[in-house]
Image: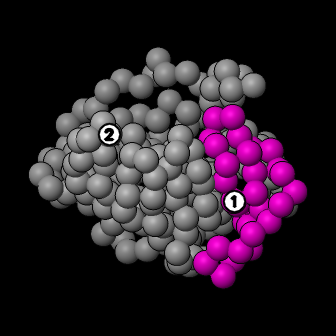
Amino acid sequence: MKMTSVCVLPVVAFIPLTTSLADDETPQLHPVEAACIDYELTGQMQNGTTRRCHRNFAYEAFEIQDLSVGFGGFSQSMNQHTITIGDTIYAIDLATNTGTQTTNPMYDQVVAAMQNTDPAGMADGFITAMGFTATGATKTIADTTCNIYDSNMMGTACLTDNGLMLEQSIMGNTQTAVSVSIGDGGNDEDYTLYQTVTISQGPDLSNMPSLQDLMNQGQ
């Protein structure tokens, strides 16, 4: 029931690191070097807030969710901290201070898609890699202008010219930005929390459909 996230791959979005790698060693996975966005989530299955930040052009990212998730009359609170570093995803349950470590099966595809674009075209490359099609409409969210896109896989989204998601609606749920900070990637401890909790091996995601497969299925 977790909403799809563009940055988590972003979805979102995941070799433990405590410091940044050199620029020539770190693939750029997003046009913006560092940013933090706070969202309000509303919809049929979940309500609450999410804080999503990244740095090192999204090679490192984290997402903090404080949600009430409900389905069929059942409701449960969820407080989860997800950290993405390269191709490794750490999903941490803040209530138990435990988490899992998994490998993002789409990482190599995203790296290839992003590195085949020049700096000027990186935002367009990112948007294309996510399967978005421009509608031509725009809106202003959190004092920031964004362009509305449709995607068979990702629903409807409003993205800035440099690829930051300010709003997304999918499967009856919507996340909308309430604050946007560009250039600030958030606190260091939010990127290293996995080092202080009990981490176990998560599920093998290698058999999941590839990004291209999902896009083809949606067409």
Label for residue 178?
none
Task: Give the CA distance from mark 2 to mark 1.
Answer: 26 Å
Q: Quadrant of the C terminus?
A: top right
Instruction: Residue 138: say if magenta.
Output: yes
Pick the front one: 203 or 154: 154
Q: Which residues are magenta?
A: 132-161
Residue at (69% x, 59% y) in the render: 158
- Which amino acid lies under the numbered mark 2 shown in the image of this protein? Phe
- What residue is at 36 percent from the left and 24 percent from the top? 204
- Per the image, the residue denoted by label 1 is 158
Residue visible at 62% across and 41% down? Answer: 154
Q: Which residue, given by chain and number where applicable, does mark 2 sit on?
A: 71
Quick check: can you spot residue 37?
Answer: no
Q: Nearer the viewer, mark 2 or mark 1?
A: 2
Res 105 visible: yes
Q: Bin the neighbour count of mark 2 within 10 Å (Cα to Cα): few under 14, some 14-19, many 20 and up.
A: few
Q: Name the quarter where the N terminus is drawn.
A: top left
Residue 80 image offset from top left, x and y in percent? 28, 54
Residue 65 lies, with reference to residue 4, above or below; the image says: below
How far across and down, in percent of the image, does residue 21 sit? 50, 59
Point out the residue furthest to the right here. Answer: 136
Q: Nearer the viewer, residue 24 or 56?
A: 56
Q: Is residue 100 magenta?
A: no
* Colour setup of the view: one colour
In the image, what residue type sits under mark 1? Cys
CB contact under 8 Å: marks 2 and 1:
no
Q: In the image as oriented, which residue stretches furthest toward the top?
A: 207
